[in-house]
Image: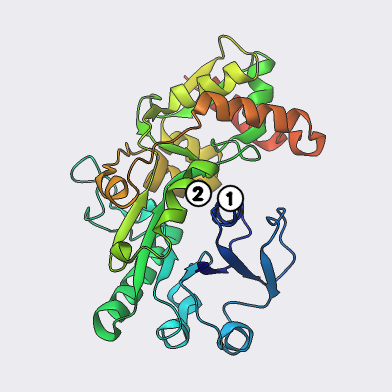
Amino acid sequence: MTTRILFLGGAGMIGSAAAREAVAQGAEVTIVTRTEPRRPVADGVRQLRGDVRDREQLAALVGGENWDSVVNWVGFTPGDLDGHVELFRDTTSQYVFISTCSVFARPVPTLPITESSPRRQPVFGYARDKVECELTLEDAYRSHDFPLTIVRPFHTYDRTTLPILSGWTAIERMRAGEGVVVHGDGTSLWTLMHSTDFARAFVPLLGNQHAVGESVNVVSGDILTWDQIHLTLAAAAGVRSPRLVHRSSESIATEIPGWGEVLEHDFRHTMLFDTTKLQRLVPGFAPRVSLSQGAREIIEHYEATPAAREPDAELSAAFDRLIARP
């Protein structure tokens, strides 16, 4: 019997990769998006137009059908979940909520991070709201037998996404021999995952009854410093010895206020993960795309896409001011 999967949203980077992987594995995939997806939708995917946050509209679109798995890619606040328990409690055997590993407390009391590490994020709005969504759905699981699985990606990327805050501006500055600012001393540890690797780890969780009632951190386990991330991107861009300049997160935030929250409550902290649960649920999973390969794909994509290569003059000027500080 064909597995029937419903994506609420899911036309973004990791959702579109997951849809391609699910179709490749023989699943029947339906996605509901409010507007035309910006990324190509995999052949064979059924598309429906509707606002998944409008309970009446969503019920009219999909309420009469049964699903092996329903995946909510676009639940960012508890209000986004209104009506989902009632709509899907009896029409699916698994409701998958896409959360984030940013829900875990910073600094993490004990490394490596596991699914049972404490969740606490009082300031960083995106992660704080995801914590509230998780708690809301966990209550439905306990009180109403709602078939919940929580999936937490971490920092994912693909060929269209430079996995650093400074984006293409950093590449242009490296190539010009100009300094690029890296937060802290560049040695805090981080984990990146290519979207195709995420999809390969994620799709086997769909319809997997061993995952119901569980939260799963879907991460690669690959450990990198922020200096290594910048150096790998530089090498892919043909720069042998980029000038990396280290400044504190607090100093950076004074010149680039938009970075303050994410640096203070996310990027500055070492993040290492235990992947035991993922390995148990998806036996044999191992990432295939190294950052070196992923970085080459990124540079090739940007080189072929002139519109994506617009450097940010304000950001570059902020870097110059930070570098000029003693």
Specify whether residue 29 is in view. Answer: yes
In the displayed structure image, the side of residue 41 where residue 269 appears, left or right: left
In the displayed structure image, the side of residue 51 where residue 266 appears, left or right: left
Q: Helix, strand or loop at disc 2?
A: helix
Instruction: Give the residue at mark 1.
Output: 17
> Extreme front residue here?
1
Q: Position of residue 146 (x, y in %)?
A: 34, 79
Type of the residue with mark 1: Ala
Classify 42 as above or below 178: below
Which residue is depicted at the point 68% across and 16% down? 175
Which residue is depicted at the point 39% across and 75% down? 93
Q: Helix, strand or loop at disc 1?
A: helix
Q: Are marks 2 and 1 in contact (CB under 8 Å)?
A: yes
Which residue is depicted at the point 54% across and 43% down? 196
Along the polypeptide, which appears first: circle 2 or circle 1? 1
In the displayed structure image, the side of residue 174 where residue 188 appears, left or right: left
Mark number displayed over residue 199? 2
Classify 104 as above or below 180: below
Work out whether residue 183 or residue 7 is closer to the camera in this orientation and state it.
7
